[in-house]
Image (cartoon, rainbow, N blue to C red):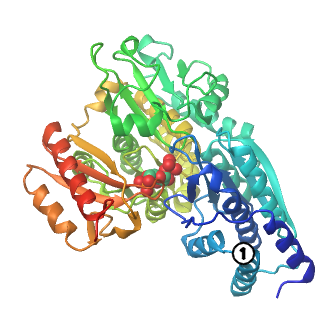
Amino acid sequence: DMNEKQLDLLLRESDRFPPPKGVRLSYGTAGFREDASVLLSTVYRVGILAALRSLKTGGVIGLMITASHNKVSDNGVKVADSSGGMLTQEWEPFANALANAPSSKDLVRLIDEFAEKENILLDGSKSAQILVARDTRPSGEVLLDAAKHGIGSIIGGVAHDMGILTTPQLHWMVRVQNQGSKASELDYFYELSNSFRCLLNSNPNNSKLNDWDNQLVVDGANGVGGLKLELLKEMLNGLAIEIRNSGKGKGVLNEGVGADFVQKEKIVPCSFGSQDVGIRCASFDGDADRLVYFTVPSESSNKINLVDGDKILSLFAIFVKEQLTILEARSKDTKIDFQPRLGVVQTAYANGASTRYLKELGLEVVFTPTGVKYLHEKAAEYDIGIYFEANGHGTVLFSDYCSTLLQPIYWELSDASEDLESHKAALRLLAVSKLINQAVGDALSGLLLVEAILRHKNWSIHEWSELYQDLPSRQLKVKVVDRTAVETTNAETEVVKPPGIQEAINLEIAKYPQGRCFIRPSGTEDVIRVYAEASTQEAADDLATSVAKLVDQFLGAGSSK
Ligand code: G16
């Protein structure tokens, strides 16, 4: 039962942010995403939710205004939970209800009921601390302001405006602040650059840093990632990085640029071309939580050779496994029993060749539906869990067991053994655990880890890319009347609704050697996604096209099903 003051405040403020008419909002793969023009009330209400979450957990919560890879006119809002990860899935139904409450009165009733159910006291006796940030979208400022009003609508709610950040920076700050450490942007840059340097210093090849073949060109998607990489670069003296599509020029966010474009279209992004043949290139997405690499193989074509999230995962897995093997060989030298479980997590989008390769390396591979919230949760079940989506979203998680044991193992090995490699292996794993974002996938820290490992192995991007050959694949989007009509199961590999479509898809798949294909509703765009894989590019294209036609038949405009 809300006190009078709280009730008045909520009613007064929420009247200023009426919900859009005729729009059904839904908490998707990564929060709410829509055309920016309809989001004011949603963002205001998510501000309220973030404040309630902070009261519930007693920790700092993050609120990020971004639509990541979506087009520039879209925007969205994501919540970072007190762990730094995605908002607990248990609160998603409440988020949906809040966003869709038709009137201020309904909204207040929902909040009152939910607070009571969750034992959240709305009497102002505690404060709720929320870090808020946004990407570079022009609609971001106004939406951020609405979020602040939402936070301020709960008595005790305090919004700390962190300005323009990458999504992973905000998640990192929330996590680190809740651990009681300093968590400014500068602290983030220090942590990344120090642990990166530590990895380079433990490099057996001690390779020179300014070799021409160490040149790296990064596509910043005309978003926040390029801006932040410019800053980080200042602290990485010796790393030759050229940044294009940094957001300072005329280019439009995510338009013909960025990780989503590069990974899905497999053609060179704007401002890349024949001058880049053979050079190591990387792409971020709009809020820098995704990373893919690529090369331009020839001057005469705009096709790229993609080095996607699956290959980043493979590179990380090889490196981590190697260090663990070195440590294992010396395990008798330490009194500490250290047998961490290593696992990798993928989704149905993982190229079949990558899964085969990882299994051949002797790794345990598990699958979840699309969405970092699912992969992260699964990876956290291991002592070292590596997860990546093919689109470049992923990270390496170290359990408490690992982080607490690695430091004493390192000390013991430094004392006891002549074998420098084993104590370096412990040091390397420690450095990886600090470098790679423990809260969420992060293009900046992912990039530095890739760079460090390539130097460690003395590999060019070509050697890395040739770990295995991707099966040809194709991705398409199909606009339908109602994408929620499609329901899937088995980590999204099978459709259960509408009836009949899976059987029709199976008939298509059977026509192609090594054919694999699935469809699923996107949780960030208003489309059905189609993924197809086969032994040749032509076959993958044909399979994707014919299944896209099926989707249109079953669910397209004018469809009666
Ligand atoms: C978000 C999620 C990713 C997901 C992607 C696409 O990425 O964080 O886990 O892979 O959406 O999702 P969907 O296929 O459902 O549209 P981002 O980079 O856009 O935040």
Disc 1 under 8 Å from ligand 1? The reply is: no
**Which residue is depicted at the point 34% across and 28% down?**
267
Instruction: State which quadrant residue 292 falls in.
Output: top left
Q: Which residue sits furthest right?
A: 5
Residue 213 screen position, x and y as percent: 41, 15
Give the residue furthest to the front.
558
| Amino acid bearing label 1 | Ser
Mark 1: secondary structure: loop
Image side of residue 7 versus residue 423, left or right: right
| Residue 284 image offset from top left, x and y in percent | 50, 35
Q: Residue shown at 46%/61% (left/top)?
A: 337
| Quadrant containing the N terminus in the rendered view | bottom right
Would you place residue 205 above or below residue 329 in this image?
above
Position of residue 262 relative to residue 379, above or below, is above
The residue nearer to you, when weighing 6 against 450, is 6
**On the image, which quarter does residue 347 sit in?**
bottom left
Q: Nearer the viewer, residue 58 or 428?
A: 58
Q: Nearer the viewer, residue 395 or 31?
A: 31
Circle 1 residues within 10 Å: few <14, some 14–19, many ≥20: some
- Residue pointed to by mark 1: 103
Compared across the picture, whether 9 is left or right of 556 comes to right
Q: How many marks?
A: 1
- Where residue 285 appears, x then y in whole percent? 51, 39
Which image quarter holds the C terminus?
bottom left
- Residue 396 seen from this side: no
Q: Is residue 506 visible?
A: yes
Q: Position of residue 410 (x, y in %)?
A: 54, 46
